[in-house]
Amino acid sequence: MILSTFDVAALLVVTAALLGYLNHHLLRLPHVIGLTVMGALVAIGLLAANAFIPGVQLDDWVANLLSQLDFSQTLLQGMLSFLLFAGALHVDLERLRRDWLPVLLLSTVGVLISTLLIGGALFAVVLAAALPLPAIWCFVFGALISPTDPVSVLGILKEKAVPPSLQAVVAGESLFNDGVGIVVFLILLASAMTGADFSIAEGAKLFAEEAGGGILLGLAIGWVGFHALRSMDAYSLEVLITIAVVMGGYAVAEPLHVSGPIAMAVAGLLIGNYGVNLAMSDVTRDYVIKFWELVDDTLNSILFLLIGLEIIAIVPHRNHVLVAAVAVPIALAARAISVWISLLVVPRAEVASRASQPMLVWGGLRGGISIALALSLPEGDVRNLLLAATFAVVLFSVLIQRATLNPFIERSKRALAGS
């Protein structure tokens, strides 16, 4: 049966809502964790039904369903723009200015180091196990799994009354390493798909053009959006203007060959700070913030569901399990090393970063951005292997790291209080 785009979207939204409902009434876990658990349980249950019940071919049905979605267009040019803008709205720009050095280093140097370490370590495993995964694709995985997701961590930091400076570092790093990671991912992906030798000089040039152009575009559309918001007091129209900033800005980025994700992060910063504080009434501010929180939650819910469906469609076997098993410790080790190296040159006055490195390492959760990038990879065995690895790292991040983050937070609070 051929489903329309609307039918597929409706199926995903209804399923995500049903899982959220069951979690709310049965498991009562925090939304992100609960949705991940429910999605994993559904995936495992369907895999078991597919394997042990005669005549059931759920993998074929799910594969056919997913083949009707253009992941590259839907995720890279749709969901990511909304996710990044929504995340940027909650970042305090004044705090970001004070802690700019650790944020800059973690979101640039840290991402590049993490990409290289993860790619190199995964390729070593691939060689030892004789798996069909070329070296360039290992580094593509390094780029897509390096960005961190601040959503669930920031919630805990606020509950535990962690100093705002540490919250700013976590939020700022996550915001900008998303944009940087996506640019690195797209550069490496283009090299992997064309088969051309990767040039560091050419890659650096493309990165500068994409990132620099994205910053300028984000400033421009953020400025236009700010002045449009300031000229009126009509909450429904002002919410529509923020949507127009995201969709219009992202649409303009592609023909200009600049980074849409970075543009969205910058535009979100401007709207979230100057627009929210200087251009909106209390009523409008409430509607805008709640609208974008809802968008962020909904899209993350659908992404977790999608990767669960993808795991069903590929029917994991030994190679997938091996790659998934090694991906988790590799990602954790790379995160620890990249944080340590990135903060070596941070002055001792920057206590928020120096005293809190263990929290920054363990709190570097992976989430919706990594899932979206993995799902956008071209069909084939390589994609299936990298999806399994991404699923494992994200699942470990949400279920294990987030659940055991409290001791690291308390240690950071004591260290900051003592300094």
Image: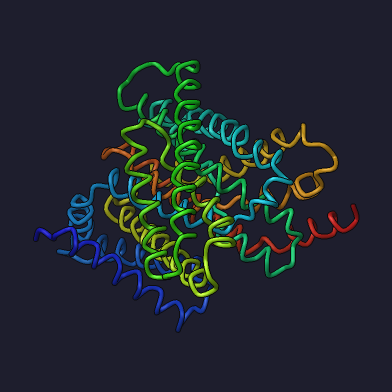
Q: Residue at x 77, y 32 (%)?
A: 345
Q: Residue furthest bottom?
A: 25
Please tell me which residue lies in front, 49 or 73: 73
State the image quarter where residue 254 is shown. top left
Looking at the image, can residue 154 be seen? yes
Looking at the image, can residue 322 be seen? no
Q: Residue at x 52, y 51 (%)?
A: 366
Where is residue 3 shown, x and y percent of the image? 13, 60
The mark total stands at 0
Where is residue 353 shown, x and y percent of the image? 75, 46
Is 414 situated left or right of 379 in this image?
A: right
Is 368 situated left or right of 88 in this image?
A: left
Please tell me which residue lies in front, 382 or 406: 406
For the N terminus, give its image quadrant. Answer: bottom left
Where is residue 372 shown, x and y percent of the image? 39, 49
In the rendered image, the vertical position of residue 307 relative to residue 147, given as above or below: below
Q: Residue at x 55, y 51 (%)?
A: 269
State the image quarter where residue 239 is shown. bottom left
Please tell me which residue lies in front, 350 or 197: 350
Please tell me which residue lies in front, 104 or 68: 104
Colouring scheme applied when the structure was drawn:
rainbow
Is 245 situated left or right of 5 in this image?
A: right
Where is residue 8 shown, x and y percent of the image? 21, 61
Q: Residue at x 45, y 69 (%)?
A: 233
Q: Residue furthest left?
A: 1
